[in-house]
Image (cartoon, rainbow, N blue to C red):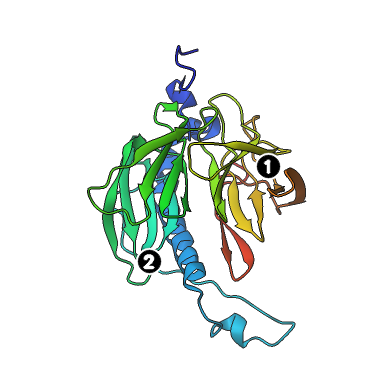
Amino acid sequence: MPDDPARVQHSPAQRPGRSRRARLSRARRRRRLLLPAGALLVLVLFLLSRALGGSGGGGAAGSASAGAVRTVLTARTSSPLPAPISGESAAAVPGGLLILGGLDSTEASVSGVFLLDPASGKLNPAGALSGPLHDAAATTLADQVLVFGGGTESSTDVVQSLPAASSAGTTATAVGHLPAVRSDLSAVTIGTKAYVLGGYDGSNPDPAVLATSDGSHFSHVADLPVPARYIATVALGGRIFAFGGETGEGGATDVIQEVDPAGGKARVVGHLPQATSHAAAVVLGGSVYILGGEANG
């Protein structure tokens, strides 16, 4: 164990953000991530931009008759990132979407922050994290973007803040610490609070769901019935929904978990068609969409 309890050191086989299964087939996984993960990111960003933009009902769903509503999702290619990445974070801001950190194709953490304009597809530099970081969680709270945990060779408990109007030359600053180190986690915002859930401490999944209104002070909301990392998470109707994830045994789960922040409770409310981890989730038109991920190895 390291002397500093705020950092957990890992060997390369235990590096946060890389499962044991994935490391045994690193070359195959890297080839899979460079294109599909990039395409998934574009699709997720596009869906988020549609949700933020309040797209009208002129599409298939708007023209369908009552009782036979059908929503058709479409995706388009936007400006490419400067280099292939995986394990990045994304947060919706008034100017578009911030893409933060990640792992490059050599599995080295990066610190770059970029702003995507969903209307034009233009990508611009928007500052940097305080240091290289991947598998963190980011969410917008008021006029700032909070970045929770993540890691490089070791997981961290640091919470960083960037202005929601971040631009080139802006560098994130540390504003607080999670109660424990955590990477591979998720974050969402409901009202005036950001919520952190999922992830692991370098050895085991962390079950605690935490709330903060400033990134510096945290309160315990509930414990997930099935602790996991790489969970797809969204907020809808004042509640948090967590889909799948990778459990402490290293395999994926099919559980759908619901967190009720007001009641301080978490429960299993359903199951995915198959066990899935590393997926993404977005809300569009009042429905939740689960995109991509890993299943059956």
Q: Position of residue 90 (x, y in %)?
A: 43, 52
Q: Is residue 262 left or right of residue 41?
A: right
Which quadrant of the figure has residue 190? Answer: bottom right
Residue type pointed to by label 1: Thr
Provide the residue designation for mark 1: 253
The answer, for residue 82, to whether it is visible in the render is no
Q: Amino acid at mark 2?
A: Thr
Q: Dot 1 surroundings within 10 Å: few (below 14), some, or many (20 or more)?
A: many
Dividing the image into 4 quarters, which one contains the C terminus? Answer: top right
Q: Residue furthest left?
A: 169
Residue drawn at x 32%, y 71% as measured from the top left: 120
Q: CA distance from mark 1 to mark 2?
A: 31 Å
Please give the name of the residue rendered at 60% of the width and 84% of the height, measured from the top-left corner: 62
User: Where does residue 84 sit, x and y in percent of width and height?
Assistant: 34, 48
Q: Nearer the viewer, residue 175 or 195?
A: 175
Q: Residue at x 56, y 42 (%)?
A: 230
Position of 288 compared to 55: left or right? right
